[in-house]
Amino acid sequence: MGGVTLIRLAGSTKPGDEAWNEIQYPVAHRLLEKCDAVFRIAGESKGADEDVRIATERGLKVFYRLDEVPAL
């Protein structure tokens, strides 16, 4: 596809730089308002940890393993 993302248009050159943090995290936190649950993929990530914290505060279910996610 090769389109330019909003983050790149804002001047971001890598995850974690100033433009990334200014856009990515607020957008992710707004998306959490539309979620019923969160699936936390293993691995170190301050952003993902913050998403889990916010989800927990909002009473959302947080899954850590795929076998925990209920079938549709």
Image: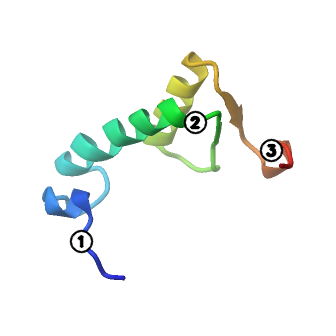
Q: Which residue is drawn at 19% across and 58% down?
A: 12
Q: Do the residues labelled 1 and 3 touch (CB within 8 Å)?
A: no
Q: Mark 1 points at which residue?
A: 4
Mark 1–mark 2 distance (CA, rounded to whole Å):
26 Å
Residue 69: numbered disc: 3
Residue count near mark 3 (Cα–Cα under 10 Å), binned few <14, some 14–19, many ≥20: some
The picture quadrant where one finds residue 52 is top right
| Quadrant in which the N terminus appears | bottom left
Query: Which amino acid does the dot numbered 1 rest on?
Result: Val
Q: Nearer the viewer, mark 3 or mark 2?
A: 2
Q: Where is residue 13 in the image (x, y as percent from the top left)?
A: 20, 64
The picture quadrant where one finds residue 36 is top right
Query: Which amino acid does the dot numbered 3 rest on?
Result: Val
| Secondary element at image label 1 | loop
Mark 1–mark 3 distance (CA, rounded to whole Å):
33 Å
Q: Position of residue 66 (x, y in %)?
A: 79, 51
| Secondary element at image label 3 | loop
For marks 3 and 2 on the same chain, the one whose residue lies earlier in the sequence: 2
Q: Where is residue 28 in the image (x, y as percent from the top left)?
A: 41, 41
Q: Residue at x 84, y 43 (%)?
A: 70
Closer-to-camera residue (12/34): 34
Mark 3–mark 2 distance (CA, rounded to whole Å):
14 Å
Q: Do the residues labelled 3 and 2 touch (CB within 8 Å)?
A: no
Q: Name the residue under label 2.
A: 35
Left or right: residue 65 compared with residue 7? right
Q: Looking at this rendering, what residue extends furthest in the bottom direction?
A: 1
Q: Residue at x 48, y 45 (%)?
A: 45
Residue count near mark 1 (Cα–Cα under 10 Å), binned few <14, some 14–19, many ≥20: few
Judge whether 16 appears above or below 5 on screen.
Answer: above
Closer-to-camera residue (9/35): 35
Q: Which residue is drawn at 60% across and 22% down?
A: 56
